[in-house]
Image (spheres, rainbow, N blue to C red):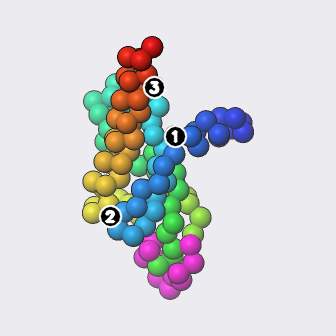
Amino acid sequence: MSTLSDKLRKTRESVVEIDGHKFTIRRPTQLEVIEIQSADGGLSLRNAFRFVVDWDLSEIDLGLPGGTGAKVPYDSDAFVEWVSDQTETWPALMTAITNSFKSHEKKLDGDSKNS
């Protein structure tokens, strides 16, 4: 990936706090939303999980036996493995990702009305 594309993706990121933990989410692009809707009619949990791009979790948070309080680097596979059992986290993640896209749509709609 290029540095420029990384910068563009970074502009779509925001942090959401859920149960005392911070997760960085990335707003889906217009194209990603269209692709998701075409594939299955909407944003499923599994689709939503791909828009989580960072965390502040430790080994203990992940429930690793003998884990320490040391923060672990984000890993998308480990995130899906962990969050798959964290049902209380799902609604807040879905809401944050959905709201990030809806806010972007409102901004685009407002910009087009002001043109």
**Residue lying farthest front?**
114
Instruction: State the separation of the CA atoms marked 2 and 3.
Output: 29 Å
Of tags 1 and 2, the one toward the viewer is: 1
Instruction: Give the residue type that dot 3 points to.
Output: Leu
Residue 6 place in picture, x, y as percent: 65, 40
**Which of the marked residues, 1 or 2, is nearer the chain's N terminus?**
1
Task: Tell me if mark 3 has few (under 14), some (14-19) or many (20+) residues whose alpha carbon lies within 10 angstroms of its own.
Answer: few
**Which of the marked residues, 1 or 3, is nearer the chain's N terminus?**
1
Residue 84 place in picture, x, y as percent: 35, 59
Instruction: State the separation of the CA atoms marked 1 and 2.
Output: 25 Å
Instruction: Give the residue type that dot 1 points to.
Output: Arg
- Write down the residue under mark 2: 86
Q: Is residue 71 left or right of residue 41?
A: right
Q: Which mark is residue 21?
A: none
Instruction: Give the residue type that dot 2 points to.
Output: Gln
Q: Is residue 72 left or right of residue 1?
A: left
* For the residues bearing labels 1 and 3, Cβ distance under 8 angstroms: no
Give the extent of the magenta segment. Answer: 61-71
Quadrant of the image for the C terminus? top left
- Write down the residue under mark 1: 12
Above or below for 109 versus 80: above
Magenta stretch, overall SS:
loop
Of tags 1 and 3, the one toward the viewer is: 1
- Write down the residue under mark 3: 31
Of tags 2 and 3, the one toward the viewer is: 3
Q: Is residue 8 magenta?
A: no
Between 18 and 40, the residue placed more toward the observer is 18
Above or below for 2 versus 55: above
Q: Identify the residue shown where x is 53% and y is 81%.
A: 69
